[in-house]
Amino acid sequence: MKAHVFAEGSNTTAEDRTKPAKEYFQGLFGMVAGLSEELSDSADTSLHVLSEEFGVLRGDQPVADAIESEQDGSADLWESAKEELLTASREADVMVILLSTDAFDKTAGEIWSELVEEAKPDSVWCIGAARSTLDAIDFEKLDKKGCSVITYQRVGVARIGTDTREDLLQAVDRKASE
């Protein structure tokens, strides 16, 4: 089983840029890193970290590697993120997208119909975003594909709530035992 988690990095960071992205970004990003670790108990999990400074990083990728490859700013970030979202959607049994309104609009929001078209039937989707973003998303096609959809209305800087996290982990456990 394959899981993909998409989230933005944080402004709170470690000083050591040789650390992998999942350890370099700190503060509330720790909730995302922890969730990714928990998902890896049930699924082969890939963490994708969107950073305006470093581009799209894999969770286990040292930030220093991204510095050396020098991304071309935020325009490339959004294009790269959209490509990774589409690729992940094709193979994900579990798709987790926890983005701010701005980042969601520039990535998943622009390609939502394609993402849903590519989604694996019976997959688990968890979307954490502002209420306005969630209200604008059409979940009907995911429902028709038999997908489980879990949403978290983002409040402030919290990426995912405790109850939503538990709902997601339970859905993943059920999926893993199918």
Image (spheres, rainbow, N blue to C red):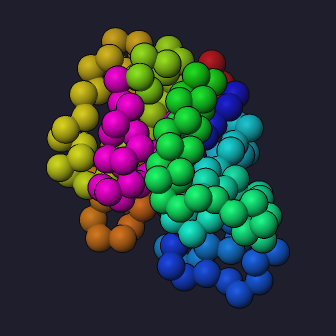
From the viewer's perspective, tell me whether residue 117 is left or right of residue 18.
Answer: left
Q: Is residue 128 above or below residue 159?
A: above
Q: Which segment is the magenta one?
A: 94-113
Residue 167 showing in the rendered view: no
From the viewer's perspective, tell me whether residue 177 is left or right of residue 94.
Answer: right
Foreground of the two, 112 or 67: 67
Residue found at x 53% / y 30% = 86
Quadrant the C terminus occupies: top right
Quadrant the N terminus occupies: top right
Q: Position of residue 48 (x, y in %)?
A: 61, 50
Q: Is residue 90 above or below residue 73?
A: above
From the viewer's perspective, tell me whether residue 106 is left or right of residue 56.
Answer: left
Residue 80 showing in the rendered view: yes
Residue found at x 24% / y 46% = 133
Q: Position of residue 121 (x, y in %)?
A: 50, 14
Q: Is residue 108 above or below residue 130?
A: above
Residue found at x 69% / y 42% = 45
